[in-house]
Amino acid sequence: MRRIAISIVLAIAVSVLLPSSICLAQQAPASTTAYIYAGNHFTDCFQDCSWPYTRHHSVMVFFTVSTPLPPNMPWKFVKPTSYIIDDGVQRLTSGSSSGWFLMATDKTGNPLYWQVQVTARYWWGVARILTYNSPGSGPITDAGSQEGYTGTTYFGKNTGDWGRWIVITTP
């Protein structure tokens, strides 16, 4: 059942995030590799997951690079040609935010360990979305938050249950 749910989420990620990134990808080189991460639903949220984050939200990451990540790559900062990261409440893009993509790959070049964090500053506060799966630096975490300048932080997170990456390379 869980595999079916992840497959459905990945299909939605591709159908929602891929079209909205076409204008970003048009500036990319002829050959592009897209990395898409679909996290599991949040299990812990502000105000018992009633608002704005609920247990139906999750982290989704879409980023492109001009060449695929190499097999067995040790920890390395990756500079995407474009990215979109979404937590179901907010969507941050390479044109409106800043962040880092620290990756390590397995023998096939797929993400094995990662730290992705993207932040945007607004008049009301800070929006942040992250996904971590890095041994030795705490539990696996997917999270989104809105940190208001008034001191209130709205958040949704899932700890200990990472999602799934898919890789698509276009010639």
Image (spheres, rainbow, N blue to C red):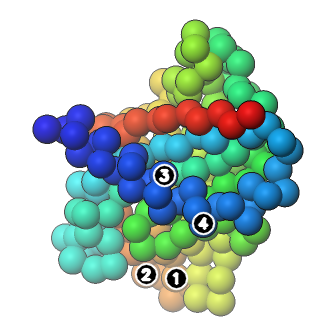
Q: Nearer the viewer, mark 1 or mark 4?
A: 4
Instruction: Report, in whole angstroms, how far the alpha carbon at label 2 lies from the one at label 4.
Output: 31 Å
Of labels 1 and 3, earlier in sequence is: 3
Whether residue 96 sits left or right of residue 105 in the image: it is right
Cα separation, mark 3 vs mark 4, equals 10 Å
Circle 2/circle 4 CB separation < 8 Å: no
Work out whether mark 3 precedes mark 4 in sequence or the reverse, and give the earlier one: 3
Give the CA separation, mark 2 to mark 3: 33 Å
| Element class at badge 4 | helix
Proximity of marks 1 and 2: CB atoms separated by less than 8 Å:
yes
Q: Position of residue 79 (x, y in %)?
A: 78, 43
**Amino acid at pointer 4:** Ser
Q: How far is the residue under mark 1 from the one under mark 4?
A: 27 Å
Q: Is residue 28 left or right of residue 109?
A: right
From the image, state whether disc 2 or disc 3 is nearer to you: 3
Across and down, in percent, residue 88 comes to 40, 68
- For the point 29% across and 56% down, the residue is 42
Residue indicated by mark 1: 148
Secondary structure under the numbered disc 3 in the rendered image: helix
Q: Which residue is mark 2?
A: 152
Q: Which mark is nearer the camera, 2 or 4?
A: 4
Q: Is residue 54 left or right of residue 81?
A: left
CB of mark 2 within 8 Å of CB of mark 3? Answer: no
Where disc 1 sits, the SS reads strand
**Could you tell me how far apart the alpha carbons at marks 1 and 2 are, in whole angstroms?**
5 Å
Q: Give the mark, 2 or 3, whose residue is nearer the N terminus.
A: 3
For label 4, the crowd category at 10 Å Cα-Cα, with few meaning under 14, some 14 to 19 and many 20 or more, is few
Q: Is residue 153 visible?
A: yes
Disc 3: which residue: 14
Residue flagged by tag 3: what amino acid is it? Val
Which residue is disc 4 drawn over?
A: 20
